[in-house]
Image: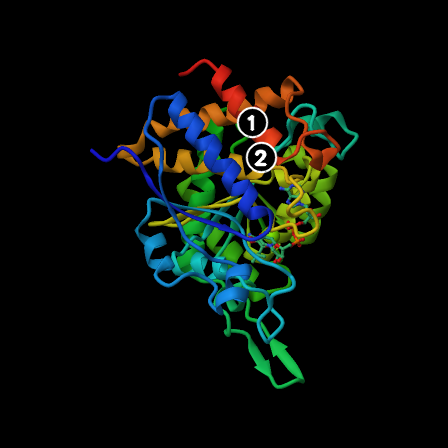
Amino acid sequence: MQQNARIAVIKGDGIGVDVADATLAVVSAVLDRVGLPGLNIDEIAAGAGYFRDTGRDIEPGGEERAAESDAIFMGAIGLPSVRHADGTEISPHLRLRDRFELYAGVRPVRAYPNAPQRLADPRAAGIDLVILRESTEGLFYSAAVHGRSQIIGDSEVRDTLRITRSICERLHRFGFRLAEKRKARGGKGLLTCVDKANVFASMAFFRKIFDEVRPEFPDIATGYNYVDAQALDLVRQPWAFDVLVTENMFGDILSDLAGGLVGGMGMASCAEIGDHHALFQPAHGSAPDIMGQDKANPLAAILSGALMLDYLADRTEFAAYADAAKLIDEAVMAGFSANRLRPMEFGGDMGTRAVTREVIDLIGESACA
Ligand SMILES: NC(=O)C1=CN([C@@H]2O[C@H](COP(=O)(O)OP(=O)(O)OC[C@H]3O[C@@H](n4cnc5c(N)ncnc54)[C@H](O)[C@@H]3O)[C@@H](O)[C@H]2O)C=CC1
Ligand SMILES: CC(C)CC(=O)C(=O)O
Ligand SMILES: [Mg+2]
């Protein structure tokens, strides 16, 4: 029986490289701790720097190798100084989301003790929600494949907002199942459909399909919010929510807002899951303002690594990875509780390498399942 998963790793640009290295070190330590063989890593060159140097955004054969892996892990891609002629940045990851139908963008938002709380209300300590961002269509449909935008000379440019039944049915079912899974662990069992169904026919369609799927999950409570009101509510009462299911662009914006509520983008983990493939990466970008300075908080990436192990564990041959995922989550929680994780991102004294070492130490000290 195969025991070590094959992971395609795209480190990408800027801090993406540092946080990917941090994650690989933590994953290697945790697998060692639970007595499992390390991952079989296949590193693939891609990103804006690679494009600047070669004229290609991913190395030849890279997408095919990613397709053959058990999961893809990515740091971050993009440099504002490297662009296509139409002004857009180099984003092969959008094409990968499209190609592999990674429609379910899972972005957990969780408050940790001693991490900054941007809201004065003590209930903010209980923030624990997930933004489920559709990740292949919506307003990113044109952007998913470079050249899809309609450029009408120098007088007009159009991008398309596309919502399809096929993706939406799977997305909403994924949202209900996620709410069920969280309810089984003590969660609220609440799925909120976040849209703009008052204005756009595409969004009314998104909500219609939500309503069609809803009767299949009678144990999950449902709610609706227009996206503008949802932005307000994420600041006013984020503790009231459980899983928010939303369109691609809305989810992109709301997930940065929500990351800010619990410390910053260095806390914003992400899994992009399809029916046959999955890609894991922090929700943040390459952060050119801090790159090369050992200042990046690697926890978003490390927690995305835990999401990857959890995903792999759902497949019979890798079931034991669940223990490793749990150990990473517990180490991060224990590290914050004991004030041993103090990322520079929120004024602490620990850079990327120090945070990574501390997580590895915490894993080493933990009692194995
Ligand atoms: N999925 C991806 O690969 C993404 C790529 N990008 C790309 O990244 C580049 C920079 O984009 P920005 O808009 O600046 O977004 P960004 O997420 O890279 O940075 C936004 C702000 O958050 C801070 N930040 C982000 N991650 C951090 C971390 N781990 N630790 C500490 N601070 C962190 C940055 O220093 C910056 O102040 C662009 O080229 C953009 O297109 C942006 C978002 C997602
Ligand atoms: C292509 C990326 C820059 C889009 C983004 O911000 C994200 O996926 O969160
Ligand atoms: Mg984003």
Which is nearer the eye, 241 or 14? Answer: 14
Q: Position of residue 310 (x, y in %)?
A: 41, 33
Q: Is residue 200 left or right of residue 305?
A: right
Q: Residues within 10 Å of mark 2 (few under 14, many from 20)?
A: many
Mark 1 and ligand 1: say if the CB distance to the nearest ligand atom is below 8 Å.
Answer: no
Q: Gap between marks 2 and 1, in whole Å?
A: 12 Å
Asked if residue 11 can be seen in this view, the reply is yes
Q: Where is 237 relative to 202, above or below?
A: above
Instruction: Please tell me in which quarter of the rendered image ligand 2 is found.
Output: bottom right
Residue at the image position 44 percent from the left and 32 percent from the top? 27
Q: How many marks?
A: 2
Residue marked by disc 1: 357
Label 2, secondary structure: give it.
helix
- The mark lying in front, picked from 2 and 1, is 1
Q: Residues within 10 Å of mark 1 (few under 14, many from 20)?
A: some
Label 1, secondary structure: give it.
helix
| Contact flag, marks 2 and 1 (Cβ < 8 Å) | no
Q: The N terminus is located in which quarter?
A: top left
Q: Position of residue 265 (x, y in %)?
A: 64, 42
Type of residue at label 2?
Leu
Mark 2 and ligand 1: say if the CB distance to the nearest ligand atom is below 8 Å.
Answer: yes
Residue at the image position 38 percent from the left and 56 percent from the top? 100
Asked if residue 219 can be seen in this view, the reply is no
Q: Is residue 247 left or right of residue 68?
A: right
Type of residue at label 1?
Arg
Residue marked by disc 2: 299
Q: Where is 251 relative to 118, above or below?
A: below
The mark nearer the N terminus, 2 or 1, is: 2
Q: The C terminus is located in which quarter?
A: top left
